[in-house]
Amino acid sequence: MDSIYLIGLIVALLVMSLAAQSLSKTFKMPIIVFLLTLGIIAGPQVLNLLNPSVFGDGLTAIVSLSVAIIVFDGGLHINLKQMRTIQRSTLKLITIGVLITFALATIITYMIIGIPLELAALFGALVAATGPTVITPLVRQIRANHKVSKVLELEGILNDAGSVILAALVFEWIVSGLSGIDAINFILIRIGIGLTIGALSGILLSRFLSRGALISEQTIRMLTVTMVLATYVIAESVGNEAGILAVAIFGIIMGTSNVSQKSVIKEFKADIVVVMLSFIFIMLAAMLRFEDIINLGLEGIIVVMLLIFLVRPIAVFASTAGSSLRKNEKAFISFIGPRGVVPASIATYFAIKLDGLNIAGGQTLVGLVFLTVIITVVMTGTLSKTVAKILGVIPMEIILVGGGEVGRILAERFEKRGENVVVIDISEEKCQRLMKKGIRAVQGDAGDINILKKAGITNAKYIVSTTDQDNTNLLVCQIAKTKFGFKNEQIIARVNNMENLHAFWDLGIRAMSPAMSSAVILENMTGKPQMFAMSEIGEEGNIMETRVTNPKIVGKSIKELRLPENSLLVMIRRCEESIVANGNVILENNDLVTIIGTGDSTRQTANLLTG
């Protein structure tokens, strides 16, 4: 093969990657949708500009190493210290959920497609897991609430490895009749190898970096990439199909560690992952043969639809029963079940092996897997943000400065109502206490712009400063306003000394004095119990404001609305006019409505008004 031709192919891949990124930003859709589309168009089935066969056996090696880096990157963004409250749900999803999906997918495929049971089981194993190559960039783009995002990311990273091992087991059963004790040993040995090698790599690298050795950022990046690839190769050499689990564990250990160089590794990995994702999705899409899918007919589409709308919800709701996840969060997790590059590449590998052994069904397997990948990726990629809005899992991004009693209670309330909250505090002890409760915390001085960026201020909608130092609160508010362009209504502060209130108000900062607020509340509770009953709705109570933007609501009177039980519209702000809400008030576009309610009713009412 001409080296110039090969270089030309690589350049073409990079150009398509840039085009996909541009289209993704323009249409606000996940990049994977466009990568798949461009790969199919450029492939042998349409324009024949890109033929993966020219890479020969090297394609499998490139895909394998790319997947290793992508899975490691996914693990790197998982911090188990901040996920104590959701680990049980994830553990059930990657065990009970995978087994339920495997069993139901096998039965459905066997009954509808009519292929041999062992081939149906191989398909069931390959699609039992969601793909981190799809989910990781997807949830980051949607910006769903922290709890849901981390469950999806951790599930994708870990169950991909479990699916690979399960598929390898079924394949060995097909070609060698593996069963009974041998099958159990096969699974346990590979899980053990993946866990051991991944943990050793994570511990070695984190301890080396923690020693504070004077090494450059470039050396850190090269060392990390080398160790990721070495971990994958060693695990695969010792136990076939154990490599993905090993790099997943390696990434999670590094993500959970406290090494100061973690941000350097993350920044570098982000650039590599975009290139790797682009390459493998374009190449695998180009490998698609239309006849493999056409031969499946309508039955193939029915199987995929049942996987999406029946099998996945059953697996999710069964796995998360009794968890802290709300119904709308479980429903969103059920919808987000795209299959990624791992099943597509492994299905192609298995098909080649089956053809070599004269075992029929390899092309049917490839067609089914590719059809599943295409439909789940396109459907998830195009509809996920809409579904997230409908189900109310896209929260506000809120930064709280101060992890004391006020900050902690406020963070817990925001978390309870489904918002994404990050607390900044200089005290390591307070940060650890917050993280034990599942609340994200960043240790450092909130007056440091780099700390604010680390906490995610560039994506935050509000910043609330709750420390007991007025100078700190004022400084943070000024930085948010001058350096990050926050508007007055986005900045809220606690003022401890009433004499300082005017200093905040003069800068347009919304501020409150705990002493003054307590006095007003106590005054109104004394002799006026009914008047101030609104303040006593309990820990489950919630008050929030939202704009009326739903065209189906505009022009209707409040009494015409079917509001959720336990919710009430209290006040309407229209331009400079404040209107007490009553049944005859007609809602207009952009009205600012104050809602009071308990439980999820406040959020449900807000979703009704915003559409």
Image (tube, rainbow, N blue to C red):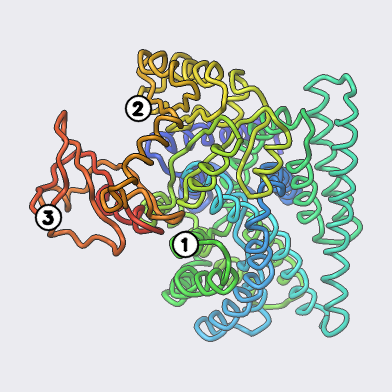
Whether label 3 touches label 2, CB < 8 Å: no
Going 83% across and 64% down the picture, which residue do you hit? 191
Real-space CA distance between mark 3 and mark 1, rounded to the nearest whole angstrom = 37 Å
Q: Position of residue 20 (x, y in %)?
A: 48, 37
Q: Position of residue 459 (x, y in %)?
A: 48, 32
- Residue 230 appears in which quarter of the rendering? top right
* Kind of residue at disc 1: Phe
Q: Position of residue 104 (x, y in %)?
A: 57, 79
Q: Which mark is residue 335?
A: 1
Whether label 2 touches label 1, CB < 8 Å: no
Which mark sits nearer the N-terminus, 2 or 1? 1
Q: Which residue is mark 2?
A: 489
Q: Which residue is mark 3?
A: 583
Going 83% across and 24% down the picture, which residue do you hit? 219
* Kind of residue at disc 2: Glu
Q: Relative to 331, is 561 on the left or the right?
A: left
Q: Position of residue 527 (x, y in %)?
A: 29, 47
